[in-house]
Amino acid sequence: MSVVARLVLLVAVWLLAWGRFDVVHVLVGLVLAVVLFVAFPMVPSGRRRIALSLRPVGVARLLWHVVVQLVRSNLLMTREIVSRRSRIHTGVIHYALESPSDLVLTLVANIIALSPGTMTVDATRDPRTISVHFLLLEDVSAAERSLAHLERLVAGAVRPSGASVR
């Protein structure tokens, strides 16, 4: 992203935060953006960029899965909140990913964190494992199958063309 694009983005965020679009707010936003650029200069990180190719069918399958899981987990959490009897049975599962991609590990961890009732506790690169806390863990093998299915969907949706960023 170019400096001008970053500048425009910062000013746009400033204007949205204030909810006003007038000359004074634009000028103040520009001044603040320049101050931020000076205070926090862009330093090349030395990291290589990941060339990413998305697979449209895989992305559609992944999005559908995420939406279904979000609805399902929200319904389960709602049932838990309004019911008189608690069904909470917590647990942590340590799942070893098969994919060697850092991108797949990152996406799986973030998708899990989206769902109410689950939380990514830890994700490690070596060995490539993810620890997931479940609020409603009734069947460990079903939870492991669900994690494996999510990993396959993520790996089917994205294909990193370059090396992993370290």
Image (tube, rainbow, N blue to C red):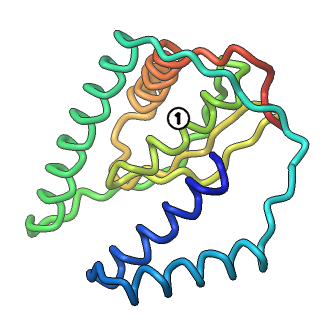
Residue 36 percent location from the top left of the image: 68, 77
Q: Is residue 73 left or right of residue 24?
A: left
Above/below status of 73 relative to 52: below
Amino acid carrying label 1: it is Val
Task: Point out the residue furthest to the right here.
Answer: 46
Secondary structure at badge 1 equals: helix
Task: Point out the residue furthest to the front here.
Answer: 23
Q: Residue at x 65, y 18 (%)?
A: 160
**For residue 125, what is the image quadrant?**
top right
Location of the C terminus by quadrant is top right
Q: Which residue is mark 1?
A: 108
Which class describes the residues within 10 Å of circle 1: few (<14), some (14-19), or many (20+)?
A: many
Residue 149 percent location from the top left of the image: 43, 19
Residue 134 percent location from the top left of the image: 43, 50
Number of marks drawn: 1
Above/below status of 80 relative to 54: below
Q: Residue at x 59, y 54 (%)?
A: 121
Q: Residue at x 14, y 49 (%)?
A: 75
Nearer to me, 54 or 3: 3
Q: Is residue 68 left or right of residue 153?
A: left
Above/below status of 94 relative to 163: below
Q: Residue at x 86, y 49 (%)?
A: 45
Nearer to me, 101 or 146: 101
Q: Is residue 19 left or right of residue 121?
A: left
Residue 129 percent location from the top left of the image: 69, 35
